[in-house]
Image (cartoon, rainbow, N blue to C red):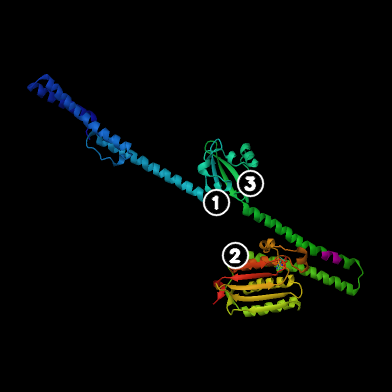
Amino acid sequence: MIPALTRFAFIVCLAFIVAFIVLANSSVELAISAGISILAVPLVYSYINLARLRRYVLSDTIEKMPLPSGFWEEVFFKLQRLVRNLKQKIRTIEQQHDHFIEAFQASPNGIIMLDESDQIEWCNSIAERFFGLIFKRDVMQRINFLIRRPEFIQYLHKRNFEDSLLLERMGPNSNLSLMLQAFPFGQKRHLLLVQDITDLQKADAMRRDFVANVSHEMRTPITVLMGFLETVQSLDLKREQQDQYFEMMMSQAQRMKSLVEDLLVLANLEANTLPATTAVIKVETLMALLKNDAEALSQGKHALNFHVNSPINLLGDEREILSAFGNLVSNAIRYTPDIGAVDVSWRVNEQGQGEFSVTDTGPGIASEHLPRLTERFYRVDRSRSRDTGGTGLGLAIVKHIANRHQAQLVIESMPGRGSTFMLRFPKERLDS
Ligand SMILES: Nc1ncnc2c1ncn2[C@@H]1O[C@H](COP(=O)(O)OP(=O)(O)OP(=O)(O)O)[C@@H](O)[C@H]1O
Ligand SMILES: [Mg+2]
């Protein structure tokens, strides 16, 4: 490429030579005009190229501009390369920015970025849901105008962000417990991280309830047992009286034993996360076993009917299935007054699902209790249930066993109209 100064010198020399040649042959005016005309050529060339450059710059398509030949070629080429590199850099930064946003959006936690005046610079959709924010509407609004909880405003105001803050009854249905913490970053800006700890709180409450319930259930028989022991020890009782006390002590010990056994069964079921096995369970044989146990429990006080309406057998863990079915049958007998009836049946419904159902003519259960029946230790009528030896763990065990067999526990009941407890098994659990 010829240097610009050399080009300039060349054109000036050319202008002088042409001017001299014209001067030698003609007048001074003509020589000056010829010299000026030659000097004007690069100016016109530059003007045309600058006009083209202007057109491409204004339409933001400078990279597409065809390169001129000559002096401007190099300039335009470098300009195009600069613009192309800059645009590429911007695209890369935009992509990185999008990735960050996508990552923040994928987070299960709420994220809010605040500037130095606590104005929202950005928040993800989880934070929008937690606090009822709409990013497009609330961007650059002060957060304390949008989250009005006094404890939150105090937390922001104190500016001591080493601790986290628990906000309860939050979210669209006011049923979320949120743990929030602010982290400083950049120049006096803050990142608010918000975690939904509703399930943790619930699990914690359940654990506390569970310990309280177990202690309570154990304390009663232990107190009674100790009372009897003291009586037997301190009083000089006759043989028959002693036998009577021992019998009562035995029944309390039995109660504790069955409680501990049920707790162990539950713990084992909970610990076992694999689905139940798929051994063939002969329903006829199972029903015969259930019938025997039911007759022994009822002692002829109820009308018991057992029907096997389908020859199709069940696939599952026989011990678990016997325990679940047995729990439902024993409940029906224990909660149905004498002379009542209990119907137990097995059938395959129109959708090809297996249904084991137990229907009784007992007192029935009010609808508000139905969703809670499978909670551990939940009893509709505590005193009555305790009379019948119940600890409130039976249906919790049934529910676990049902889950392990992908079965559904369906309860239909109305006070005064008896109850139906049904276990519905999917086709895959039937031996076709
Ligand atoms: N067939 C039924 N009729 C009326 N109430 C029932 C029936 N089955 C269960 N219930 C109610 O549901 C409650 C929970 O039943 P569940 O089987 O879990 O516990 P339980 O029978 O009290 O004790 P457990 O089964 O551990 O010995 C019972 O206390 C009882 O109030
Ligand atoms: Mg029970």
**Quadrant into which the N terminus falls:** top left
Q: Tell me the residue at 7%/22% (across/down).
A: 25
Q: Tell me the residue at 40%/44% (across/down).
A: 92
Q: Where, by quadrant of the figure, is residue 303 drawn?
A: bottom right
Q: Tell me the residue at 17%/24% (across/down).
A: 36
Q: Earlier in the sequence, mark 3 or mark 2?
A: 3
Q: Is residue 16 left or right of residue 278?
A: left
Q: Tell me: is circle 2 under 8 Å from ligand 1.
A: no
Q: Which residue is labeled 1 in the image?
A: 108
Q: Which residue is labeled 2 in the image?
A: 273
Q: Tell me the residue at 73%/58% (across/down).
A: 212
Mark 1 → mark 2, Cα distance in angstroms? 25 Å
| Main SS category, magenta section | helix
Q: Which residue is labeled 3 in the image?
A: 167
Residue 8 against residue 422 in the figure, above or below: above
Q: Magenta segment range?
A: 224-229
Q: Earlier in the sequence, mark 1 or mark 2?
A: 1
Mark 3 → mark 2, Cα distance in angstroms? 33 Å
